Image (cartoon, coloured by chain):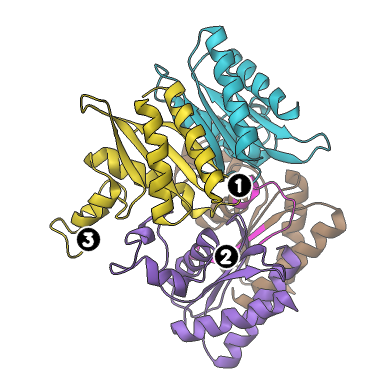
Chain colours: A purple, B yellow, C brown, D cyan
Amino acid sequence: MNATLATAMLDAAHAEARRMGVTVCISILDAAAWPVAFLRMEGVILGAVDVASKKARTAVLFQMDSADFAKIGHPDGRAYTLENTNGGMTSFGGGLVLKAADGKVLGAIGVSGASTEEDIAIARVAAKTLLA
Amino acid sequence: MNATLATAMLDAAHAEARRMGVTVCISILDAAAWPVAFLRMEGVILGAVDVASKKARTAVLFQMDSADFAKIGHPDGRAYTLENTNGGMTSFGGGLVLKAADGKVLGAIGVSGASTEEDIAIARVAAKTLLA
Amino acid sequence: MNATLATAMLDAAHAEARRMGVTVCISILDAAAWPVAFLRMEGVILGAVDVASKKARTAVLFQMDSADFAKIGHPDGRAYTLENTNGGMTSFGGGLVLKAADGKVLGAIGVSGASTEEDIAIARVAAKTLLA
Amino acid sequence: MNATLATAMLDAAHAEARRMGVTVCISILDAAAWPVAFLRMEGVILGAVDVASKKARTAVLFQMDSADFAKIGHPDGRAYTLENTNGGMTSFGGGLVLKAADGKVLGAIGVSGASTEEDIAIARVAAKTLLA
């Protein structure tokens, strides 16, 4: 992950959100969970600032999309309370692990502010930029 | 618990994890829940750093293995929300209470990063070192 | 402040830092101190992530550049300990208040990672973008 | 940095502290400030647990020994309040940056519990192990 790639991801996510007519926050972290880039669109609910970052943090710390994390950190999952570790994890979609072609984890992206399905769709468009 | 015993436990857990071909974090606390020793193997998911410590913390604060804590600190258990106390407890296995032959609590060990069953197996191997 | 203006400021700061041959973090906040945009260049010291944000936060919370804040929030200044409020303020340069032509506060930018003089120079280049 | 190297550093620091007749905590972080290994000797003041970690964190986040950081984060230094960033930095000796022969930052070690001079001496003995 680097600033140029992260900027391209922010731009792609921002453009996709405008195309869909929604507002979101976008957070990009490196493989060690340090922030690389962030963008908040005007008008988005302010709660989304932290949610976007926590979605990305969940994805990179456990090397799985936050939608998959939801299956294990749930009261009926095999690791109930896992969502209470690491300052609070996010048990719903919108956080994607970013991997290189060889499978190496590069970081994660988190999108929040629209519906969960829209957040995931925007994150996927941005993630494709990384692999292009 | 002391630094020499804790180092021997780290070494035993580290060796067992390598033998099993997995990567983990190992956290050892004394009877007052203060950290004595910690080790993180390269390549382990970063979320395991906090999970290992919280497993050990759960075990020593409630003097029961975290797998047993799971039965009470759960929406269907008899003390639901107990898992939200003390900065967040862990309701799944991998945290073991460490006791002397006379039953006195010496501390706890927490292992995280592999499957829950593997984490428990590694913690048990390390705990045996303490009693040897 | 909005995402488009903030992105243009990030781009300008990023380009200026590359031109100068330094690496920095850039943080942009709105007038309510909420994050709008952030960028971290690869290779910058990791401590700069928080410092860039705190410089911008200092500027917007007290509506003065962090270099000016340094004159009052210092053991020899007229408001010693002011630097310990609001989660910790920053008493050195690199945080600039961003104002519209009519003087209205739009937010703040914080730059950290190079020398204080370089951080200030980069922040100024980015701030000019806003007024263009 | 990896678990085997970090264990060797812990062992070297532990042995040197015993030789000197003092008790300390030793914290080893990787280049992204994530914990790799920790050891607390019995009898050390409990406040040293956090101090050892913060010394190492200061060294790695600013890529300088904590004794050098003291010169800039001080009221008379060029970046007063820098010690209030990143959750609190440490403005005295005992945190050393660990670098490879080519200058690449590998992480940091922090030692606390004895006198500052003794803490530094123990950290240096451990750091030599890394380069051996």
Can you give x and y, in whole percent of width and height, for residue A6 in the image? Answer: 69, 69
Can you give x and y, in whole percent of width and height, for residue C116 in the image? Answer: 73, 44
Assess disc 1: are there few (<14), some (14-19) or many (≥20) residues with their C-alpha within 10 Å of its C-alpha: some
Q: CA distance from mark 1 to mark 2?
A: 42 Å
Vertically, is C65 above or below A132?
Answer: above
Q: Is residue D101 left or right of residue B94?
A: right
Q: Which residues are magenta?
A: C26-49
- Co-location on one chain, circles 3 and 2: no
The magenta stretch spans residue B54:
no
Can you give x and y, in whole percent of width and height, for residue C19 in the image? Answer: 87, 59
Q: CA distance from mark 3 to mark 2?
A: 45 Å
Residue occupied by mark 3:
B74
Residue at point 64% right, 40% down? D2
Which numbered disc covers residue C107? 2
Q: Is residue A88 left or right of residue D120?
A: left
> Residue C72 occupies which quadrant of the picture?
top right
**Contact (Cβ within 8 Å) of mark 3 with mark 1:** no
- Co-location on one chain, circles 1 and 2: no
Residue at point 36% right, 65% down? A73
